[in-house]
Amino acid sequence: MAKLQYEIVDVFTDRPFTGNPLAVVFGAEGLATEQLQALAREFHLSETAFVLPPSDGATYRLRIFTPEVELPFAGHPSVGTAVTLSRRGWAGLDAASNAEVVQECGAGLLPIQVYADGRATLTGGPPTLGPELDPAPLLGIVGLTADDLAGPPPRTAGCGLEWTFLAVRPDAVVRASLNSDAARRQGVTELVVFAWDADRRASHARVFVPGSGVPEDPATGSAALAFGVYAVAVGLLPADDRSTYTIHQGAELHRPSTLECTVTAASGTAQGATVTGAVVPIATGEIAVPPFIG
């Protein structure tokens, strides 16, 4: 039976067995989408990344799968794969030197700066922003009430993927508990529940993704990018120039993660965002190629 090489790495952390685990799979260019999805279901991590030959202008192509669906883009697979490929010397990369790679994915061509210390900075896609939303259904989905609400009204924002942001009191973040049935009834596929610390420009966040077969994610780069777009729009971060902010996530899953971010804004509108994180190698191995059933 044919087998593929893979690595498991922990992303957005500098310590093993924390952060968000990622499977990076090599040599899958001859497989059908159904086979890639079967492999992602077998790994059963929040995301599995498949490194493929690129088109012109990219260093590599990446396809990203949750256990249930393919994503056009995701942050922790992008950061984790870029650092892993640099460490393996992919396409002439040198792990001892800083370098910029260009990742081709469903969201287009995305630049990623890789550093010799095992970190990488991902630049998100074009910012998007949705209207204000009624907080009541969102609070109900995570078992909270109107008394838990804090800060600006919820709304969606994105920087490659769109997320819905719900600001609550610090103690409510810990108490949040996803009701998947309620989320399905409301048509909510992703929700970020967070408390904002203005003095430290830091967010304690929990990310629920019932629409992708991931009840809760320990570190979510695309949501961290989108938070900058949201934070500028609602006045949590300055309306102009470049700001820094930090996302703390995953403690409730015993996988604490740290995402260091920037957002650039002009006249109250985000122009772009970045997220930086470290990557720790955990395991290497081979996995059998699943049969294709057409």
Image: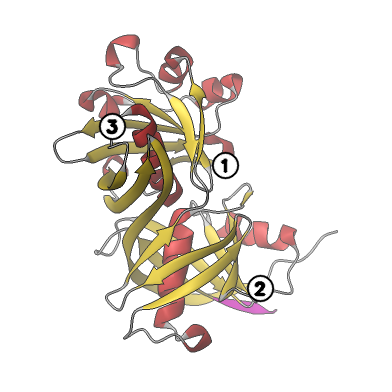
Identify the disc placed on residue 236.
Answer: 3
Please name the amino acid that badge 1 sits on: Ser
User: Where's the N terminus, which quadrant?
Assistant: bottom right
The image shows residue 38, relative to residue 119, as above or below, that is above
Assign a secondary structure to mark 2.
loop
Identify the disc placed on residue 132.
Answer: none
Please name the amino acid that badge 2 sits on: Ala
Q: CA distance from mark 3 to mark 1?
A: 29 Å
Assign a secondary structure to mark 3.
loop
Identify the disc placed on residue 212.
Answer: 1
User: Where's the C terminus, which quadrant?
Assistant: bottom right
Q: Which residue is mark 2?
A: 28
Left or right: where 33 falls relative to 232: right
Mark 2 touches mark 3? (CB < 8 Å) = no
Report the front residue among 125 and 54: 125
Residue 30 sits in quarter: bottom right
Looking at marks 3 and 1 on the same chain, the residue that comes earlier in the sequence is marked by 1
Please tell me how crowded label 2 is: few (under 14), some (14-19), or many (20+) other residues with Cα within 10 Å. some
Q: Which residues are magenta?
A: 1-5
Residue at 47 percent of width and 53 percent of height: 124
Viewer-nearest of labels 3 and 1? 3
Q: Position of residue 222 (x, y in %)?
A: 45, 48
Looking at marks 2 and 1 on the same chain, the residue that comes earlier in the sequence is marked by 2
